[in-house]
Image: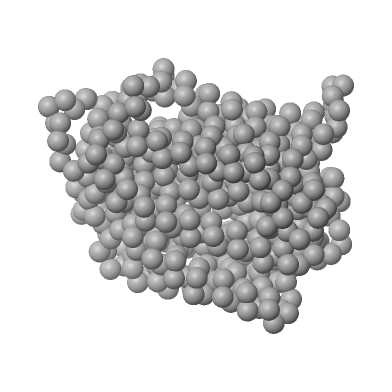
Amino acid sequence: MFFTRDKSFYSSLVKLAIPIALQNAITFAVNFADNLMVGSLGDSAISGVYVGNQLQTLLQMFIGGIEGAILILAAQYWGKRDTRSIKKIVATGVHFAVVVGFVISVFAFIFPTQVMAFFSEDMTVVEVGTPYVRIVSLSYLFFCISQVMVATMRAVETAKIGLYVSFASLGVNVVLNYVLIFGKLGLPALGVTGAAIATLISRILEALIMVVYVRGIDKKLKLRFRDLLKSDRRIVHDFIKYGLPLMGGQVVWSVNMLAQTWIFGRFDGSVMTATSITGQLHNMMYIAMNGLSSAVGIIIGKTVGAGRMDKIREYSRTTQVIFICVGLLSGLAVHLLRDGFIALYTDASPEAVAYSRQFINVISITIIGTCYQAACLFGLVKSGGDISFVFKNDTIFVFLVVLPSGLLATFLGAPAWVVYACLKCDQILKCFVALVKINKYNWAKNLTRENTDQEEAEPAEA
């Protein structure tokens, strides 16, 4: 049987995946609105914002590792309904997130020009992106707080709050973008700087909503500010032990993305513009997969934590079939949407449009592999407890396959689309590794401890 007959799997998958996917869609809409409005200012503006967001990409990778540790550990403890241990996990995650956010914020605020110059040799792009980086850097700490809180709520199967936060952020961001970028309501036209201010305000709002919800509305964890000040060395040990491979994987991936930006920075500005346009379409198609993958991860973590190993095999077979189908549909959709999507960028240069077509042709194929291997390795292997495998796998592919092939193609003067294909080749190659690993079924590992303060454990609401 390829599909499980357990109806609770499908109901949980839908219940969790829809709000997560919708939240991702709204987050995409916010970024896309930024990209599209800034795009009306020309190639330099698009490239400036794209390059300026590379530190945000680095921050997201670190925070993604922290979120992953919270989700994987907390979901397994949620399977045991051990809310006291979950609170300690959250407190540890908040401590790490605040430190990371503060350090990157200070660095970006003090050295915005140097950050831009590292990624692009085009001084027009550097000049446009420098004020953007300095202003957006002020939002990093708020971003860290909101993302940790959203991950916490997802781990205990409260996914809808992330959706509501994203709705609020979308409305504020789009309105402020329109007003500040183009100078409406009597305000001066600030261009790229206006986009940065809009991003800052929307992220402050996200953090405030999440803090209010977690503190005053959530009934599952009943988290209080004093809980975030506490520390448990055993939980910290587990967080570091299992979180470091996750953070390491995110660092490896961030190095990969930053290096790719550096490689494309060796070409002219139209290539960078095409990379930005293609990235937006890829992210749009990634929404459904990411929602399903996150939902599967929560279900698998909860199942392992509850000791239901009998369900792992049938859940994993079902998951693989689902993601193969999602990948094929995504690849077809990317191909069909290509020209219409590019046409939205009315001020993109003819060169940028031509490069975009070539790059999108590449991702129409590689996204099939992305949907299978990335989703299954996270939703099954990583969430099931075999965290270090994914880290090692990513490290090998990034440093021995992706970057060497991309650098070699650049050095040999290959066309931009060939370089782009080299930098995406791992999305197909990893499928063979994922297929073997997943079907060995040796990745389901219970990471929880027996509750050391069981007598104090709090009852949790389902």
Question: Observer-nearest residue: 298 or 313?
Answer: 298
Residue extending furthest toward the front? 110
Residue drawn at x 80%, y 65% as measured from the top left:
268
The answer to whether residue 46 is above or below residue 419 is: above
Which quadrant of the view contains residue 159?
Answer: top left
Residue drawn at x 72%, y 48% as measured from the top left:
113
Quarter of the image containing the N terminus?
bottom left
Question: Observer-nearest residue: 137 or 189?
Answer: 137
Residue extending furthest toward the top? 216
Residue drawn at x 83%, y 53% as measured from the top left:
124
| Residue 143 rendering spot, x and y as whole percentages | 54, 36
The answer to whether residue 12 is above or below residue 319 is: above
| Residue 291 rendering spot, x and y as whole percentages | 49, 46
Q: Is residue 314 visible?
A: no
Which quadrant of the view contains residue 274?
Answer: bottom right
Residue extending furthest toward the bottom? 412
Q: Is residue 414 visible?
A: yes
Residue drawn at x 60%, y 34% as measured from the top left:
139
| Residue 261 rendering spot, x and y as whole percentages | 65, 60
| Residue 80 rendering spot, x and y as whole percentages | 21, 38
Which quadrant of the view contains residue 389?
Answer: bottom left
